[in-house]
Image (cartoon, grey):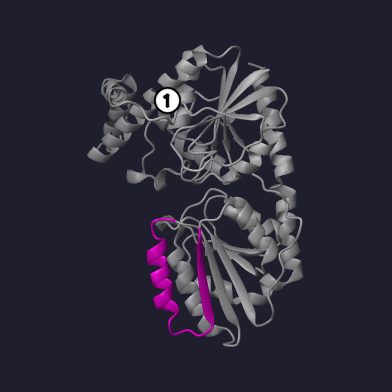
Amino acid sequence: MIDVWIVTHHFPCEPGEQFLEEEIKFWAKQQQARVTLLPILPGTVSRPLPQEIAVDYCLSQESSRLFRKIKAIRAIFSRRLWKELFWLQKMKMLSAGTFISAWRSEAMILRICARLRWKIARTKGRVIAYSYWFDVGAYALAALRREGVVDYVVTRAHGFDLYEERQPNSYMPLRRQFVRDFDQIFAVSGQGKKYLYDRFSIPESLLSTARLGVQIGNKLSSCSSANTYNVVSVSFCVSVKRIDRIIEGIAIAAQKIDKNVLISWTHIGDGELKDMLESKADQAFISISNVRFHFLGHLSNADVLNYYKVNNVDVFINTSESEGLPISIMEAMSYGIPAIAPAVGGIPELINQENGWLLSGQPCVDQIARALIAVQHYKSEQTRQAARQTIFKNYNSEVNYKTFISNFINKSNEY
């Protein structure tokens, strides 16, 4: 029996990381390992977990002011930090912003390492670790592997934790110092794997693609009636998601399609821009009689899936500036809902003209409107079956998570 530690941001607590709920079900069935979740950040409500999965909140407990000060001071004198600063200077990237990012990241790594050393000292047997995100939690595990106190370390890489351009100052603090300290780095898409190789010169032997997966919906979502066109989007209300473009695209589309067809748009998700976006939608649609919209706010993952079961949904839309490979799109497609989305991240591996509509990476609102106007394409039984089959063949959680976990355990036993 080995101990598997899974480092997360908040999970099993809210907010976010709801897509981990599906993967954890398969970890719970793993009889060769004791699995413990280790969230780094404090959360709110805890989600229910299988009884086989333990949770340790040692990383997310509030640190004393003295402990935080000590680690912040130690970070200033850390060899890693100074090595990073020299690299930033060489690349002409050193600024107050990049210095603070590097310093804060190093202080966080030191805090996580200190807590994990304490836990490791009280653990019998081998410890293997898996970070769900390719960020400071993963770097702390890599640092402990370098010290020889953790036996085997892997990480996933998704979207915001993958693409350096999405970070402040287009800079991933300290990443380049740790890329060779992992036993394996799993990108969720082939494009993500290529990006890691090209951007960070990570050896190909350390890189793999491990797609996420979703349950295949046991019921196809139905189309709406001939006089209704139901559009759904699911995301946090933040700038990178470009939800304002959905609003503008719907406004144009509504004026070009048959005025007797009602466009009903539902957005699921909360965030800092939610109120502003609702106001924008009010203004955009105030004089357009054939548009209705609803902002439902945050829903649990189970409630989102139930929405697809009990409501007629014609098309799912995403207009994000940057993505990894969105679970939200996979879930909709598993219910036979075609998707409109931009060619960013791994999305071109998921969407094509047979199962939806692939936009350009930087779609203008007219392009979004043209995609929305193709109503009959999304209501076509052939298109909806193609959407479901894409998920069944390539993003089936039953296959993908079992394969990932089996390979993880088997590889770790070789070390």
Question: Residue 118 colored magenta?
Answer: no
Neighbour class for label 1 at 10 Å: few (<14), some, many (≥20)? Answer: many
Q: Quadrant of residue 217?
A: bottom right
Q: Residue at x 49, y 35 (%)?
A: 134
Q: Residue at x 73, y 52 (%)?
A: 216
Which x, y percent locates residue 164? 42, 43
Which x, y percent locates residue 356? 64, 64
Q: Is residue 282 above or below residue 259?
A: above
Q: Which residue is mark 1?
A: 112
Question: Is 286 positioned to the left or the right of 64 in the image?
Answer: right
Magenta region, residue range: 271-297
Q: Quadrant of the C terminus?
A: top right
Question: Is 413 positioned to the left or the right of 90 in the image?
Answer: right
Question: Is 108 positioned to the left or the right of 334 in the image?
Answer: left
Q: Residue at x 58, y 21 (%)?
A: 128
- Label 1 sits on a secondary structure element that is helix
Q: Quadrant of residue 135?
A: top left
Q: Quadrant of residue 237?
A: bottom left
Residue positioned most to the left:
96
Question: Residue 285 colored magenta?
Answer: yes
Which x, y percent locates residue 313? 65, 68
Which x, y percent locates residue 130? 56, 29
Of 214 and 204, nearer the camera is 214
Tally of numbered tags: 1
Q: In the image, what residue type sits under mark 1?
A: Ile
Q: Is residue 261 above or below residue 155?
A: below
Of 73 and 359, nearer the camera is 73
Whether residue 354 is visible here, answered yes or no, is: no
